[in-house]
Amino acid sequence: MENDVFLSLLRQHRAIAVIRAADLELGICQAEAAAAGGMRLIEITWDSASPGDLVNKLRHRLPHCTVGIGTALSLADLAQAAEAGAQFCFCPHTSPPLIHLAQTLHLPIVPGALTPNEIVAAWSTGAAAVKVFPVGAMGGASYIRAVRGPLGRIPLVPTGGVTVDNAGEMIRAGAIAVGLSTSLFAEATIARGDWAAITTLAAQLVDRLAKPAPQP
């Protein structure tokens, strides 16, 4: 997938369901619950149980979704993810070798950064977009709005502190999309297998993000 195609998907869907799965079946249930609520971008963190198998299974079970990975830390992580069928990659840091490999594999990559200097450095490597993490620790939407002033050309994807309630604020502040994890997949909800609750939250999120927002 080329970067421009991935960016179009981010603009269209606005939210990424970030799944850190304790086991394969739980990961499938979480992804299917989010997809049932209308979410179409699914990220499996590479520190999940059997992440490659999970990506591969979701590619077949959820053909209407785009499935990628997160928390890629090494070249081996990325190579294995691509072999499993991952369609995009997020990582918590900026690694030029990792980004170069992703480009070679035609895999859109979104490296992590926080300060304006880090964001520009990440973008300069040829990344599809830049993950702003942890945005909650920096003030949330107000921080995105502030850095978007001088860095308006760079597509930003805030994560870490994004919730169903504040996701819309992030988009209105200028983020191209947001990533949600624990606010969507609460431990207690997963423990009791309440997949309908996750579907309801996902549907609320999709509805709230359907409002028009500035394009990066």
Image (tube, helix red, strand yellow):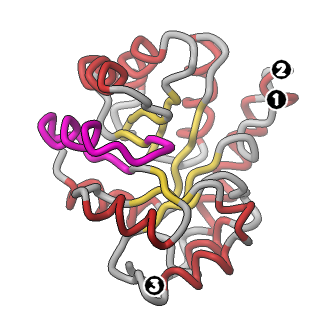
Residue 92 covered by magenta stretch: yes
User: What residue does disc 3 label?
Assistant: 214
Mark 2 neighbour density, 10 Å: few (under 14) some (14–19) many (20 or more): few
Instruction: Give 154 or 116, whichever is nearer the viewer.
Output: 116
User: What residue does disc 1 label?
Assistant: 187
Distance from disc 3 to disc 2, alpha carbons, whole Å, reads: 38 Å
Q: Give the secondary structure at mark 2.
A: helix
Residue type pointed to by label 3: Pro
Q: Judge whether 76 appears above or below 73 on screen.
A: above
Q: Quick check: 190 left or right of 84?
A: right
User: Which residue is depicted at the point 48% across and 73% down?
Assistant: 116
Residue type pointed to by label 1: Glu
User: Which residue is depicted at the point 56% across and 31% down?
Assistant: 31
Distance from disc 3 to disc 1, alpha carbons, whole Å, reads: 33 Å
Residue 76 covered by magenta stretch: no
Tell me which corner region of the image, top left, top right, bottom left or bottom right, holds residue 58.
top left
Earlier sequence position, callout 3 versus callout 1: 1
Residue type pointed to by label 2: Ala
Report the magenta residues as a range: 91-110
Q: Quick check: 135 left or right of 7?
A: right
Quadrant in which the N terminus appears? top left
User: What residue does disc 2 label?
Assistant: 191
Q: Judge whether 177 appears above or below 26 on screen.
A: below
Earlier sequence position, callout 3 versus callout 2: 2
Q: Position of residue 10 (x, y in %)?
A: 39, 60
